[in-house]
Amino acid sequence: MCGVKGLGVRGWLLLGLITVVVLAATGVWNPFPTMWDWVDRSEPISQPDVVWQQRVGGTPKSVTIAGDAVIVEQRTRVEARSLATGAQLWERKADWAAVAGGDRDPVVAVGKLLVKGYELLDPATGVVRRRDDQAVAVWTYRNLLLDARCAEATDCTLSAWEPRGTRPLWTAFLPGVHSGLLADNPELLGTRRLGAPRIDGGAAGPEDVPPLLGFPVDGRVHVVDTATGRVLQNVQPGREERLAVIGGRLLRITATSRDGSCYFSISGVDPATGREAWRRTGVNLRTADYAGCVQREDPQGARNVLLGVAPDGREAVLDGYDGRLLLVGADGEKLLAVDDRYALVRSADKRSILGRELSVDHTRWTRPAGGKSGAALTPYAAVIAEEKPSRLIAVDPRTGRELVVLRTSANALAVGPNGMIIGEGREIGYVRWGAAAAVPPPPDQGAVPGPNPDGTYQPPSDQGSCGPKKELC
């Protein structure tokens, strides 16, 4: 008894430490992980605080919400975390990763650079669902996965798969797919997205596969029907032309140098027949650098719409399917973001952002914003990044209703139906939309609502399968 009383402060501390170690070793109680989390906890990356905040293994290259998981691609590995808690679900070595599928059937394609093949993983468990050891390139979409394998440089096969399918839906022959091993989502001939500071270019996640894709091979363009795998066109661009496949059309964009200026003409061709469906002149799609009007860039836009500059200097949005002008801005207005349904526009006085609906060219909402604010559109929310004060704001793209307002210097990395992932350095966190209900994706993400070429209108109930102008069928 006297010995116990004479332990002193150091003795009691040592006895307590020994007791804790014994309890931890026997699995009765282990306080060390919690203590380390408390010591290692970083400052919150936003105000109000996020639902959860975690430090990942390395600076993310991309972050994607895949069902109930968050896929974090890093330089040499990929990891998955629970969307609900942020806890790590699995991790593995990989040089690249890309998500295919929608909210109910997502998969993660992973592979190594300069090595053929890829694996498809379950986002929640990391279990391999399908393995391929020959593919040199993979393209991931919300409703389809494409891969290409080449017996020789000029002998390649393109295959289409359902995201969780085990047999290809179709295969097509292509005389090459560029050269070398291309990993995930090599560039095709389509549109260039508008960028925004502090909003990741892939925040919207995978999109639905377009009805047609344009594969550049040895200076020619091979147009592939993604429903059947048929190669509809094999086209050599003219000397002053640039080709792009947008909105179910093959666009032939001509830039001619004359009188010290560039003169532009756009022709929309039906690839199935080779006939011209529409033509428009005088709209600059920003494909040329004015050094002899050489076109080195794809046109700006998103999915089935194009951005251009009218002869009077006003910015405009065109429908790639029929060439209609869907929106013509006022003098001094600047387009910040666009998709098939809406456009976000900075006002001429640089004091506000306007939300406009393309089908009616109508301003849906207006909110104050600084002259350096950036914006992006996703299927679930419009995201606005502001400076001084530094904030991220998510709103309903149709009504402008605020979903969340964060005072933060972090970036918007991924947007889902119920919230978004933000990040700064190695820290990422999940922000859930406010008390309001989540914004559901539109029934049709494939085309701008509008009349058919014959003047009729496709009922909304059919838009999910074929699109309002039947371009997906």
Image (cartoon, helix red, strand yellow):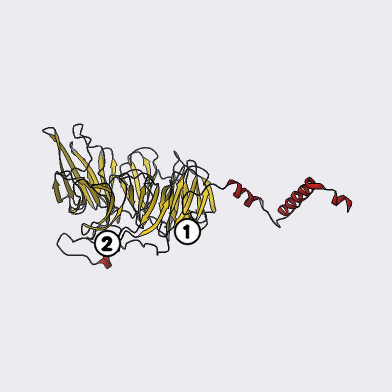
In x, y percent, where is residue 99?
A: 42, 51
Q: Could you tell me if residue 30 is visible in this image?
A: yes
Q: Nearer the viewer, residue 147 or 441?
A: 441
Query: How far across and down, in percent of the image, does residue 6 sit?
Result: 85, 48
In the image, residue 314 lies at what x, y percent?
18, 46
In the image, what residue type sits under mark 1?
Asp
Q: Which residue is mark 2?
A: 466
Q: Position of residue 215 (x, y in %)?
A: 29, 44
In primary-sequence order, the first of circles 2 and 1 is: 1
Q: Dot 1: few (<14), some (14–19), or many (≥20) neighbours within 10 Å?
A: some
Q: Looking at the rendering, which quadrant does residue 284 occupy?
A: top left
Which residue shows up at 41% across the image and 51% down it? 414
Quadrant, the C terminus: bottom left
Quadrant of the image for the N terminus? bottom right
Which residue position is annotated with label 1? 68
Q: Viewer-proximal residue, 188 or 13?
A: 13
Give left or right: position of 20 versus 397: right
Report the side of 271 relative to 197 (left or right): left
Is residue 435 depicted above or below 189 in this figure?
below
Occupied quadrant, residue 180: top left
Q: Nearer the viewer, mark 2 or mark 1?
A: 1
Along the viewing direction, whichever of 317 and 236 lies nearer the viewer: 317
Label 2 crowding class (10 Å Cα cut-off): few <14, some 14-19, many 20+?
A: some
Q: Residue flagged by tag 2: what amino acid is it?
A: Cys
The structure residue drawn at horizontal position 26% and vertical position 66%, both measured from the top left corner, is 460
Which residue of the protein is positioned furthest toward the left in this rendering? 259
At mark 1, the secondary structure is: loop
Residue 340 seen in the figure: no
